[in-house]
Amino acid sequence: MRILVLSDLHANATAFAAALDSAEGRWDVSVCLGDVVGYGPDPHDVVAMLRKLGTQTIRGNHDKAVAGLMDTTDFNPVAKAAVDWTRSQLNAEDLAWLSALPHGPLATDGIVLVHGAFQDEDEYVFTPAQALDGLLDSSAEVTFFGHTHHQGGFSYQDSNLEVLQIRPRTSESFSALRIEEPRRYLLNPGSIGQPRDGDPRAGFAIADLEHQTVEFWRAPYDISAVQGRMRAASLPEPLVQRLIVGR
Ligand code: ZN
């Protein structure tokens, strides 16, 4: 079974559609690590697309904020403005769906899903030290996390923690990682809607544990079309600008 792993879609329907085009015919089930909405111009459309796909989805901090399940006083003003605008674009059914999303860790299809850190859905995992707790605590050989919007990850065996360099080059659509038992893996598929690892293409992963591979994909999309919709919605300019640089 091949699992399409999505994360941090951030209301970017054009990036999501491009990712689905690239992945077409290559997956059987889909999962999402949260932050379906927030920042981007298409919150209703992205919720509708995910629901249509039947994607097993856990919540991210932006989903919680938009659904009113989280205090946003900690959000920076730009993120807060996006949360308020996003809420105004969603209907009651969208909001009810967001509110009902389960939190991670969630075990499904032989993998574990978390939004941020294994122990705290709102914490970022950037460093090996931050990754180690999750690698030790997760029940699965392969755990997927999001939140940082950086495609990549970590593996661990016998006190040896490795930072994985697995992003495809600009000229490539994907790069494949071989899963080697009994190593454990904490992997980030990258962000669909707002990459921050220097590659502006939409990031996602396809996991095939029966064949012991995880592919890390990047799909180019029409960034200027998304920027046009963001400006038309008066979303904060820093959010518009960052899409083109992928930071
Ligand atoms: Zn996010």
Image: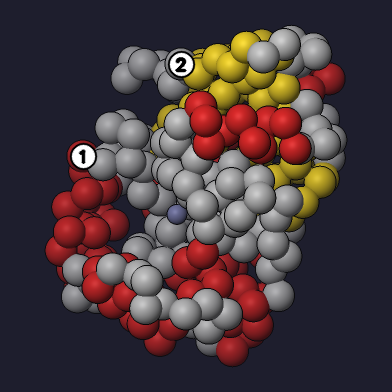
Circle 1 residues within 10 Å: few <14, some 14–19, many ≥20: some
Tell me: 228 left or right of 130: left
> Who comes first in sequence, dot 1 or dot 2?
2
Q: Which is more foreground, mark 1 or mark 2? A: 2
- Residue at point 67%, 58% (across, down): 58
Tell me: 242 left or right of 172: left
Query: What amino acid type is highlighted by mark number 1?
Result: Val
Q: Position of residue 154 (x, y in %)?
A: 57, 23
Depth check: 161 or 144 in front? 161
- Residue at point 53%, 58% (across, down): 122
Q: Is residue 26 visible?
A: no
Relative height, residue 124 to residue 4 (above, below): below
Q: CA distance from mark 1 to mark 2?
A: 20 Å
Dot 2: element: loop
Query: What amino acid type is highlighted by mark number 2?
Result: Gln
Q: Position of residue 146 (x, y in %)?
A: 53, 45
Q: Are marks 1 and 2 in contact (CB under 8 Å)?
A: no
The N terminus, quarter of image: top right
Res 165 label: 2
Mark 2 close to ligand 1, CB under 8 Å: no
Depth check: 91 or 75 in front? 75
Mark 1 close to ligand 1, CB under 8 Å: no
Res 71 label: none
Circle 2 residues within 10 Å: few <14, some 14–19, many ≥20: few
Relative height, residue 8 to residue 174 (above, below): below
Tell me: 106 left or right of 190: right
Depth check: 206 or 149 in front? 149
Q: Position of residue 176 (x, y in %)?
A: 58, 15
- Residue at point 37%, 78% (across, down): 73
The C terminus, quarter of image: top left
**Which residue is labeled 1 in the image?**
245
Colouring scheme applied when the structure was drawn: secondary structure
